[in-house]
Image (cartoon, rainbow, N blue to C red):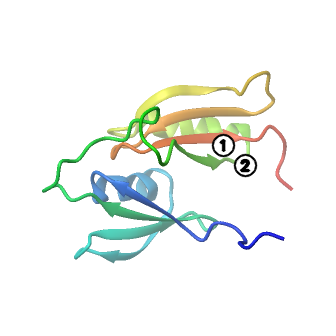
């Protein structure tokens, strides 16, 4: 029997709290709550997952995360309900300022799963994935 029961929230350090919050709220339609400018930090949610976003201290030597060199978050994978939904997200991301598309929607291996990868304006690497079957 596991000692835990799932993810409560995921805390992420970001380059720009405003840019990353805007990515989740304005581009993906998430809601923001709990902003604290003294830290600074906020929380965003899609109604199923909650992320806390913490802006790095720019007075320090800030370094971008290198997924092959650093221990920590390789990427955040967000599930999309349908393949059409994934393609709609892809179109929004391509039109969004500051978003870098690593690769457009493609099959995972031989399929049926389809995914894409991007970096949001604050540098977080995010995968969007359709599991290849209807959610029930």
Q: Is residue 29 left or right of residue 26?
A: right
What residue is shown at x 82% (from left), y 52% (from top)? 135
Q: Quadrant of residue 89?
A: top right
- Distance CA(mark 1)–CA(mark 2): 6 Å
Report the quarter where the C terminus lies: bottom right
User: Is 110 drawn above or below residue 34 in the view shown?
Assistant: above
User: Is 112 drawn above or below residue 70 in the view shown?
Assistant: above
Q: Is residue 6 left or right of residue 95?
A: right
Badge 1: few (under 14), some or many (20 or more) residues near its Cα, within 10 Å? Answer: some
Residue 7, position as x, y percentages in the image: 63, 66
Q: Residue furthest top?
A: 110
Q: Is residue 6 left or right of residue 94?
A: right
The circle on residue 63 is: none
What residue is shown at x 16% (from left), y 54% (from top)? 60
Are the residues at dot 1 and dot 2 in contact (C-beta closer than 8 Å)? yes
What residue is shown at x 50% (from left), y 62% (from top)? 30
Q: Residue furthest right?
A: 136
What residue is shown at x 26% (from left), y 73% (from top)? 39
Report which residue position mark 2 lands on: 81
The circle on residue 85 is: 1
Q: How many numbered discs, if any?
A: 2
Q: Circle 1 — which element?
A: helix
Q: Nearer the viewer, residue 68 or 84?
A: 68
Residue 4, position as x, y percentages in the image: 71, 72
Q: Circle 2 — which element?
A: loop
Report the quarter where the N terminus lies: bottom right
């Amino acid at each position: 029997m596991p000692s835990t029961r799932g993810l409560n929230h995921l805390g992420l350090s970001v380059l720009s709290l405003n840019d990353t919050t805007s990515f989740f709220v304005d581009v993906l339609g998430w809601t923001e709550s709990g902003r604290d400018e003294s830290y600074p930090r906020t929380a965003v949610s899609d109604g199923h997952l909650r992320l806390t976003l913490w802006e790095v201290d720019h007075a320090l030597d800030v370094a971008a995360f290198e997924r092959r060199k650093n221990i920590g978050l390789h990427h955040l994978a967000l599930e999309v309900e349908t393949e059409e939904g994934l393609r709609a997200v892809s179109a929004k991301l391509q039109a969004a300022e500051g978003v870098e598309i690593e690769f457009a929607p493609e099959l995972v291996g031989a399929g049926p799963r389809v995914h894409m990868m991007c970096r949001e304006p604050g540098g977080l690497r995010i995968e969007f994935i359709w599991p290849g079957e209807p959610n029930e």
